[in-house]
Image (cartoon, coloured by chain):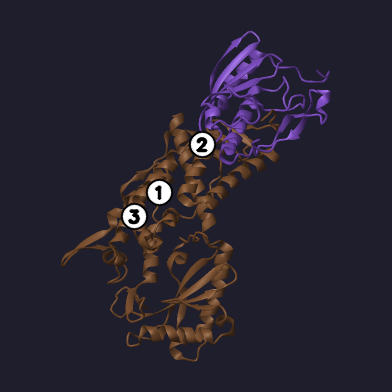
Amino acid sequence: MRFDSPRPLTAAQQYLALRTNPACQGEGQLRGNMLTWRFPVTPTALSRQYDARLEYRHEMSPKVYVDAPDLVVLADGCRLPHVYEQSPPRLCLYLPGSGEWGAWMRLDQTMVPWTALWLFYFEAWLLSGEWSGGGLEPTVRENSDRQQQTAGRTSLRPSTGRP
Amino acid sequence: MYIERQTALRKAQLFGLLERLCERLELSPTQADRAKTSYEAVGQWLAGAEAEWLASSSIYLQGSTALGTTVKPIGQNEHDVDLVNHIPGLGQWLPPALCKQMVGDRLKASQRYSVILEEKPRCWRLNYASEIHLDITPSIPNPSCSNGGELVPDKTLRCWKATNPKGYRDAFKQRAALIPQMRMLKSFAEDRARADADIEPFPKPPRFKGLLCRIVQIAKRHRDTYFLSRDASLAPISVILTTLAAWSYEYCVRSMVFDSELDVLCEVLRHMPDFIGQQAVAGGVEWTIWNETTEGENFAERWNTEPAKAQAFFDWHVAAMQDLERLTAAEGLDRLSKSLTKSFGQAPADEVMQDMFANVAAARSYRTLGFAPGIGLTTTVAPAARATSVRSNTFFGAH
């Protein structure tokens, strides 16, 4: 952490913020420095209602899952874009290490709106097969000489659409 | 209360999408201006004729352009603008074919018009390069109509047919001016008292044109889409849809209270067939949809010689109600878009959805995207409101 960074919020502070923000209506649990928050998200009034779950351990990366409806079923077997895990889908909402999220930022003002935005682009993706929300995805750059058996190097490329 | 509010928002936004869809299909303000300049010039040319009877003629809009209910034909880029060239100095003694010929001769005498002139069965068409046609139908006074009606050539050009474009337009506009009574939802009433009342749901409602015009446009566009894969010659003519919608609108507005514009649309469409008349004639029953503004014009006349046309109307109506119900029930932008495509065609459905995505993308890049309780994403800037501003982010992760 940089010397001048703001102080990280505790899990209890995050939990309080989630409970008091009317845009994050839901319910959760706080156990020590670990919190779970379950909340319904409807990105726009014309969208589905999704049940999301946020898990956070103090100063670790927040994890956001979509529990219902089953996104893989909605995607009709296609691989979901911008997720860390397919099932249950864990959403990739920010670029780690970029400063987009830090432990001093409120989850109710970052993860929750980003979840709505992800789901908005998810429905657009279901429609067109294109991820129009922008983003970056790690790619494995294979070495041209397979004999070297290099495992490959992770790099970032702009996100486009369905593979 | 949350569900109630969500439902109301859904309906408002869905109707907003339908309005935007209509906006894309109607004559644009620029096209309307061009059409006006063009038909005024034609009117001057006709009135500049040496023949006294033509010199006293006037030209005015009729049909969907006059009513504000234009819908671009599918697969074409051109709008038809229907005009009446009213010639007060002529009477029924003149054969309709000759009257039409005389107007045509005057148009042919102009270098400018002769090259873009095309003869149609009942009228003269001027094909402009700017995506519009002007269809000019000659008319003469109808002395037996107490409503100021007129006579136009019938399709065979052998006799005169009663009509009243001005009277019809006035009656339509009177009905269109009726405002439906809306029930205000309790949760909305409470919201209005709060500081966040200025949060507008996403997407922002478009310019308000008037519900009846929109309902007519929606019905016409659905008809066009429905008959694309069927016998288009059986499709109900626009004046039938417009008349039934206007009568149904008046009935619904006078007898019901609504939750939303979308509900008005559904009810008006649902009740359209109730206003089709039937009258006993020797040997059976005839369909009637009378032009109330003149004597003797039955818009459903053709249904009596071609019963398949009547059946096609009722089949279309069942399909339109089903599609509207599916559209109202569709959850998810993907399903909604598919439902819009089925009802109104791929191109306008894609365009309104792309508009919505572009709105969010723009708000995101200007950092004005908000997230508000009970609303979701909103592109309205409302700093005092309870909306959370959506911070910049980069969706990361593998496909």
Residue at the spot 70% in from the left edge and 23% down from the top edge: A105
Q: Colour of chain A?
A: purple
Q: Which mark is residue B332?
A: 2
Residue B310, by quadrant, is: bottom left
Q: Which of these two is toward me, B16 or B135?
A: B135
Position of residue B343 measured from the top left corner of the image (x, y, whole percent): 45, 49
Q: Amino acid at mark 2?
A: Gly
The crowding category of the residue bearing disc 3, from other C-alpha atoms within 10 Å (few below 14, some 14 to 19, many at least 20), is many
The residue that mark 1 highlights is B265
Q: CA distance from mark 1 to mark 2?
A: 21 Å
Q: Is residue A147 left or right of residue B201?
A: right
> Quadrant location of the N terminus of chain B?
top left
N-terminal of the pair, mark 2 or mark 3, is: 3
Q: Which mark is residue B250?
A: 3
Residue at mark 2 to residue at mark 3: CA–CA distance:
33 Å
Depth check, mark 2 against mark 3: the one in front is: 2
Dot 2 and dot 3 within a common chain: yes
Q: Is residue B105 visible?
A: yes
